[in-house]
Image (tube, rainbow, N blue to C red):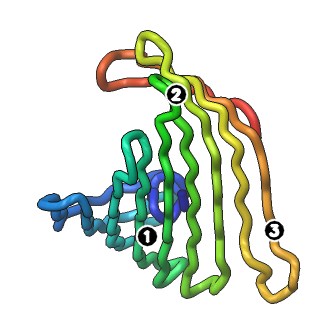
Amino acid sequence: MSSRESPGAASAGWMGSGGGRVDGRPATVVLAGGFFFGSRLKPYLQARFTQPWQLAPGHALRLRETFFWTEADHLGATTALAYDWAVAPGLALHWSNAATLTQESRNLEWTSSLALSKALPGHQLLTLEVVASGEGTHGTGVGRSERGVLAHWEQPLVEPWLAGEVVLGH
């Protein structure tokens, strides 16, 4: 997922509101706007379209397209495709891919992850994840990329509304 889709992921904080949600069918459209805040308020706008498909029992595919505007990036878009497979009861495989292009950078940023999750008693969740991300070449012929392995442990702290998560790895 790109930080441009999740305003709080790349800033000291954010606030905003959304509206225009259309839930009469499986696809959804969400319009949102607000402000990143840190040293000063920075406005953002976004429109997100999500289309899920149930391919077969235990197999789902989800397409998400987000168009956005920020002061730093100007216009941009993120396309994400995710595949979920319920391997067995309490065991799931998740494959996620996303790519972002902005008017300012004109350079493709991408990410891909493959995760295996095991649900444990007491609403605990253990996940092992292999991640890769990178960006285009900026015209140099050599793109930058990163790879890593993560282990996640999640459990409820105050049910049902507060959970804790520990993430190890890089």
Identify the residue position indicated by label 1 in the image: 42
Q: Position of residue 118 (x, y in %)?
A: 54, 24
Q: Mark 2: few, some, or many residues within 10 Å (few <14, many ≥20)? A: some
Give the amino acid at mark 3: Arg
Q: Residues within 10 Å of mark 1 (few under 14, many from 20)?
A: some
Q: Mark 2 points at which residue?
A: 91
Q: How many labels does the image show?
A: 3
Q: What residue type is labelled 1?
A: Lys
Residue that numbered label 3 is attached to: 144
If the image is split into quadrants, where does the C terminus sit? top right
Between the residue at mark 3 and the residue at mark 2, the CA separation in whole angstroms equals: 33 Å
Disc nearest the viewer among 3 and 2: 2
Q: Position of residue 169 (x, y in %)?
A: 75, 35
Q: Quick check: marks 3 and 2 in contact, CB under 8 Å?
A: no
**Mark toward the start of the polypeptide (3 vs 2):** 2
Residue at the (55%, 61%) spot, across then down: 2
Amino acid, disc 2: Leu
Which secondary structure, mark 2? strand
Question: Who's the residue at 49% across and 70% down the image?
Answer: 79
The local crowd at label 3, few if under 14, some if 14 to 19, many if 20 or more residues have their Cα within 10 Å, is few
Q: Which is more toward the observer, 142 or 115?
A: 115
> What SS does tag 3 mark?
loop
Query: Is residue 39 visible from the viewing direction of this image?
Result: no
> In the rendering, which numbered label is found on residue 113?
none
Q: Which quarter of the rendering shows the N terminus? A: bottom right
